[in-house]
Image: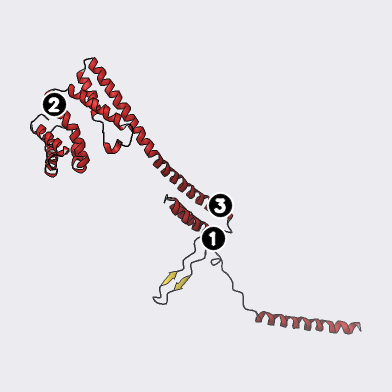
Amino acid sequence: MRRFLLTILPYSLCMILGILLIVELRRESSQPPIKQISPRENKINPVPVVVKDSSTDNPKESKQPLSRRDQLKADIARIEKLSLKQDKEIIKKHNKQLTKELIQSYANDPAALAEIYIKLSNAWNWAESHTEERAAALQAGPLIEKTRIDYAVLEMQRLLDMGKCKIKLKDFKGARKQFNQVARFPIEDEFFSSTILFEKMKKLHTQAVLHYIKLTPDNELHKVVYLPFARAEIDRTYPEKSKKIYRASDIKTARFKSKFIGVIGIILEDEPVGKPIRKHALGLFEYIRSGLF
């Protein structure tokens, strides 16, 4: 019996192994072959896919989407551009739209969302501060104007007092200089009539002119009486024509005189007889033509 088993067993094992081998080969042949990936193809950044254009058959590279960081930079640039508008209402409108849009885009990126919030708040704070600055400037306007007028009154009073002191010291030339500075202050009804200081300014101005006239030789009285008032009238009525001329008012040249006479001629032609500006212009014209100017 033992000899019989030793004779049969090797043949049985060979048959079983053969059957198993046949089954395994059939199973492998029924599966699709596995594609081998070469090291060249296994890269982090693949080569862009080339798409054939059916109309021209020219290859075109497919556009690569922006990276997350590049997209964040682009959105931040939009916010910074918005903050330059410096208008509270515009920023309020766009801020609401951008906030909703960007929160949806970066809902899964807390770090990017925090950066977006910071930029949006900076833009809003800039708009708030800019609006407050403009409002403060508007409120400060009347106060600045009042301060300027207060200073003008104090300066006129100081110059007038100095002129009177120089008269007592027999320094008539110095006194005339002080009174002349007071007389040259711009006294315009439309600028100062709404202030309580206007009457005081007119009084100081009149005192300075009277003192100046008393200290002026007879051959220069015309210049004292007409020139300051005529300049104010011409400036107010003909600002464009007189601007360039008065820049050179201290240059006593033939060119300046000809320009000045030209403007006076225009006034004499345009203004009717009897108007104060025509009277001043005529006086100036005669004064310049006399050669005293």
Q: Amino acid at mark 3?
A: Ala
Relative to 255, is 43 on the left or the right?
A: right
Q: Secondary structure at mark 1?
A: helix
Quadrant where the N terminus lies? bottom right
Q: Amino acid at mark 1?
A: Ser
Q: Amino acid at mark 2?
A: Glu
How many other residues sit within 10 Å of disc 2, few (<14), some (14-19) or many (≥20)?
A: few
Relative to 86, is 36 on the left or the right?
A: right
Q: Residue at x 16, y 32 (%)?
A: 226
Q: Residue at x 27, y 36 (%)?
A: 189
Percent across and percent down for residue 291 are 8, 30
Mark seen at residue 105 = 1
- Quarter of the rendering containing residue 256: top left
* Residue identifier under label 2: 220
Percent across and percent down for residue 272 are 13, 43
From the viewer's side, name the closer residue of 45 and 192: 192
Total of numbered circles in the picture? 3
Percent across and percent down for residue 243 are 21, 40
In this view of the protein, can residue 250 be seen by the observer? Answer: no
* Residue identifier under label 3: 114
Relative to 144, is 46 on the left or the right?
A: right
Q: Secondary structure at mark 3?
A: helix
Comparing labels 1 and 2, the label whose residue is closer to the camera = 2
Q: CA distance from mark 2 to mark 3?
A: 78 Å
Q: Secondary structure at mark 2?
A: helix
Relative to 109, is 10 on the left or the right?
A: right
Query: Most extreme residue toward the top, as rendered?
Result: 169
Query: Most extreme residue toward the right, as rendered?
Result: 1
Placement of 267 over or under 15, stated as above or below: above
From the viewer's side, name the closer residue of 10 and 250: 250
